[in-house]
Image (cartoon, grey):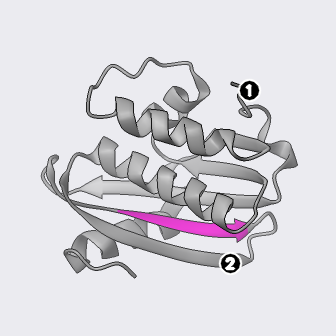
Amino acid sequence: MKLPFDSPAKSDVVAYVDGGARGNPGPAGFGVRVEARDGTLIEEFGASIGVATNNIAEYRGLIAALTWARDHGCRDLLVRSDSLLLVQQMLGNYKVKSSGLQPLHAKARLLAGELDHVGFEHVRRESNVHADRLANAAMDSAGKSF
């Protein structure tokens, strides 16, 4: 399978993703903010995912972003996340040892493979405030999508 993970420079659409759990595991949710490269908001959304770990919530946010890109005809995507684990696993630099994350990682790789190009970039938490806000709103919403 061709891996479309390389330089993020050519992507015109940026998806900021975040996930979290209160209690780890605990009530969990994710947030996704999709922007044009110039920072113009395209769409933002999130969802509560029940009881899960932080890492599962991070992957669920990534899967939601990749699904959004596929469903909206976006062929080139840059994913920005403050989860170093998620970014490094998607780049193939870290192994996915957790049996709970392995199927989510596999699904994310399959979705990414449906796009022409996906770049991954680790960002500081301060650069991911919108996705964090959405993830927290999702955890607060207890089972509702928005």
Q: Are marks 1 and 2 in contact (CB under 8 Å)?
A: no
Percent position of residue 42, x then y: 69, 77
Residue identified by numbered label 1: 2
Question: Where is the N terminus found, in terms of image quarters?
Answer: top right
Q: Residues within 10 Å of mark 1 (few under 14, many from 20)?
A: few
Q: Amino acid at mark 2?
A: Leu
* Callout 2: SS: strand
> Which of the 4 image quadrants contains residue 44?
bottom right
Q: Amino acid at mark 1?
A: Lys
Badge 2: few (under 14), some or many (20 or more) residues near its Cα, within 10 Å? Answer: few
CA–CA distance between discs 1 and 2? Answer: 30 Å
Q: Earlier in the sequence, mark 1 or mark 2?
A: 1
Q: Which secondary structure, mark 1? A: loop
- Residue marked by disc 2: 41
Can you tell which mark lies on residue 47? none
Q: Is residue 66 magenta?
A: no
Q: Give the residue displayed 66% in from the left and 58% down from the top.
A: 70
Query: Is 29 left, or right, of 40 in this rendering?
Result: left
Q: What kind of secondary structure does the magenta stretch mostly adopt? A: strand
Tell me residue 94's x, y (percent): 48, 19
Mark toward the viewer: 1 or 2: 1
Q: Position of residue 28 (x, y in %)?
A: 24, 59
Residue range highlighted in magenta: 30-35
Closer to the camera, 54 or 68?
68
User: Residue shown at 33%/51% (left/top)?
Assistant: 57
